[in-house]
Amino acid sequence: MSVKVAVVGCGHWGKNHVRNFAQLGALAAVVDPHAPTAQRFADEYGAAALSFDQALEHKDVDAVVIAAPAELHADLAVRAFDAGKHVFVEKPIALTLEEAETMKAASLRAGKTLMVGHLLQYHPAFVALRDFVGAGKLGTLRYAYSHRCSLGKFRTEENALWSFAPHDVSMLLALFGKAPDSVTGTGGSFVTDGVEDECRVDMTFPGGGRAHVFASWLHPFKEHRLIVVGETGMAVFEDSANGDEKLRLYRHTIDTSGAAPVPAKADWEPIPYGDDEPLRTECQHFLDACAGGKALTDADEAMRVLDVLLKASA
């Protein structure tokens, strides 16, 4: 089955979807509230520039890719399902669990795929890390933390938690393989009143595992780092690093035979990973799901992430 998509929203991130689906030979149409923007991308990639209603009515459009503000996700997705289309929606899936449940129900009613853009689940280095942890090669997880920081881009419509942290929460839930039994969050607004520039989310998991996320766009340098500490090893996924340093394994040990624990440090070693572009992999995964496969980042996974965000915001 050859799936054709309409990308809804050609802005800062949506334009990357336009490029990738075009390169995959799956772009049928583009939709944007700014008509000249839609026409420019349509001309560049040989697609049709349509309104959202026209895209839903178009016989050659099998699916819509929604890269619009989160407050529009539920309405656009439900309308697309009611028109018999598959739906990919960027993170977060919605702003409330009720909206997300409505989206899931509409997808089930239509018998169509609902997939959410938790991009780092498709990053080859994280895939390798997830498989490494899942195979028990770090032993039982003790704790993990993720830092996603940079200087800007400053938002006024959403805070750092909702803009940055969904990626990290998604990765941590995948690594621990279960929902947390406790979630707390804090944050601070320094640039725009009421919009938190930095935030921290703390989670505890059944069995004693712990995790936290620190996200900030008020930071002196770019830092995208996930550290995972298990009983038998430690791993680092540093997306802002290059080559072998992006995914590292540390086999440090701790001697507890004496009066006080003594660490024995080991040199790091690389964990092999692929070189596929994460967004290209994600886009292809959506096309495969529409053709009969199962989406990795489906509604249930996205709602588990959303539940953490809401609890951290409470």
Image: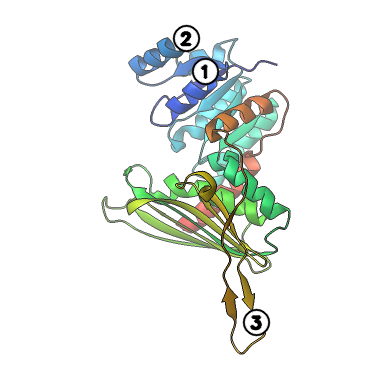
Left or right of 121 in this view: 30 = left
Above/below status of 94 relative to 111? below
- The alpha-carbon separation of the residues under discs 3 and 1 comes to 57 Å
Image quarter of the N terminus: top right
Label disc, if present, on residue 22 of the rendered structure: 1
Dot 1 amino acid type = Ala
For label 2, the residue is 46
For label 3, the residue is 256
29 and 239: which is toward the camera: 239
**Mark 2, residues whose alpha carbon is within 10 Å: few (<14), some, or many (≥20)?**
some
Dot 2 amino acid type = Gly
Q: Is residue 186 visible?
A: yes
313 and 260: which is toward the camera: 260
Q: Which residue reaches farthest bottom? A: 259
Q: Earlier in the sequence, mark 2 or mark 1?
A: 1
Nearer the observer, disc 3 or disc 1?
3
Q: Earlier in the sequence, mark 3 or mark 2?
A: 2
User: How far from the left and from the top, in percent, is residue 10?
Assistant: 41, 24
Residue that appears at 56% across and 62% down: 267
